[in-house]
Amino acid sequence: MLHPRGKIYGVEPQRMEILITGASGKLGMYLLREGPDQLVGCSRNPPLQSFGRSVERLDPSDLDRLEPLNPQVIIHTAALSAVADCHQNPDLADQVNHLLTARLAHWCHANGRRFIYVSTDMVFDGESAPYREDANPCPLSEYGRSKWRGEKAALAFDSTLVARIALMVGPALGTGRAHYDQLVEQLRAGQSLSLFQDEWRGMISYQDAAQALLQLCRQPVTGIVHLAGPRLSRLELGQQIAAKLGVPSLVTAGWRSDYPAPEPRARDLTLADTRLHAILPDWSPRSIASQLDAWLT
Ligand SMILES: NC(=O)c1ccc[n+]([C@@H]2O[C@H](COP(=O)([O-])OP(=O)(O)OC[C@H]3O[C@@H](n4cnc5c(N)ncnc54)[C@H](OP(=O)(O)O)[C@@H]3O)[C@@H](O)[C@H]2O)c1
């Protein structure tokens, strides 16, 4: 695909500088760890540990400072990613998840660079799973709505790939804590957990999602692609972790209706990922259960 300025979107592996926005985030840290030497991160608060990769102290909205980094591909992970934060501050959610995405996508298009926008299964309402890439979004939360606005803005440019990822699971590599870390801490402390038996996601590890995104950098694909692992309920995830920790009785089955939330929770956000398998035939996500031994040692 030839850009008006004569640059080619996509495959130039030997000189491919990949820029990761939100490098201190949970996915950002896995991308730093798994990525090739030609990868740089940008972060408003660079992490202490960056796996030998350079991370620039830079707000991704500062396009003048982005330019000298000369990325061929941007993987845009920076986001207001907590559902509760977006609900409490919809203006900030729009600014980060939508407007910042639109600016970066425009910059990439104008400069002949590829743009990979990391989006979410939460653009769907959970009533018609499994969702293919051409399914109609209908988000239930402010987070999902802001990410969908980000998708639409980014897809206005034919240099964009929107990678919708299912719920990511695994230990945080930086100083922050992932949802998985909280579950493990609570179970290790002997705390009983009631987890939803009526909420399903195609859960994928941060590591597998990062590796798939990095492989997608080498493919001249645009549009939308879904990245997901095997379908699991919240309850099944907790049961698998509790069984590995030797405390299976601490996890009991709950219902979403037992825990009223300010925004509705989607029932089943399982993603169909056949397009990804066609693009990356040698890639396949591992089950969460198969990775627990490595995470818990
Ligand atoms: N977690 C999941 O299960 C999941 C599932 C599907 C999709 N996603 C998407 O995947 C991406 C990464 O998720 P994550 O779990 O790694 O999120 P995260 O840990 O919250 O990291 C997001 C990063 O975004 C940057 N950021 C936050 N607020 C910002 C602001 N106001 N302006 C600019 N940058 C800001 C921060 O990085 P710096 O401080 O380094 O700048 C932050 O560490 C997000 O786009 C999210 O929507 C997540």
Image: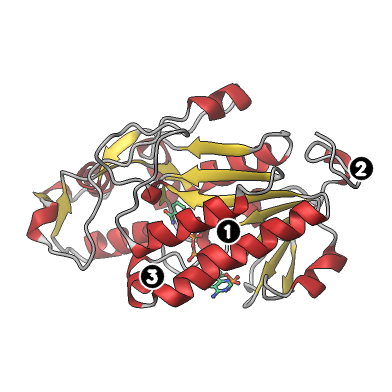
Query: Three-letter amino acid code at disc 2?
Result: Gly
Identify the residue under disc 3: 86
**Label 1 amino acid?**
Thr
Q: Earlier in the sequence, mark 1 or mark 3?
A: 1
Secondary structure under badge 3?
helix
Q: In the image, 250: left or right of 38?
A: left
The image's colouring method is secondary structure
Measured as percent of width and height from the top left, residue 137 is found at 39, 45
Q: What is the spatial separation of the Cα atoms under label 1 and label 3, in whole angstroms?
A: 16 Å
Mark 1: C-beta under 8 Å from nearest atom of ligand 1: yes
Dot 1 alpha-carbon crowd within 10 angstroms: few under 14, some 14 to 19, many 20 or more: many
Mark 2 lies on residue: 6
Which disc is residue 77 wearing?
1
Mark nearest the camera among 3 and 2 is 2
Residue 284: image x %, image y %? 52, 28
Is residue 297 visible to us here?
no
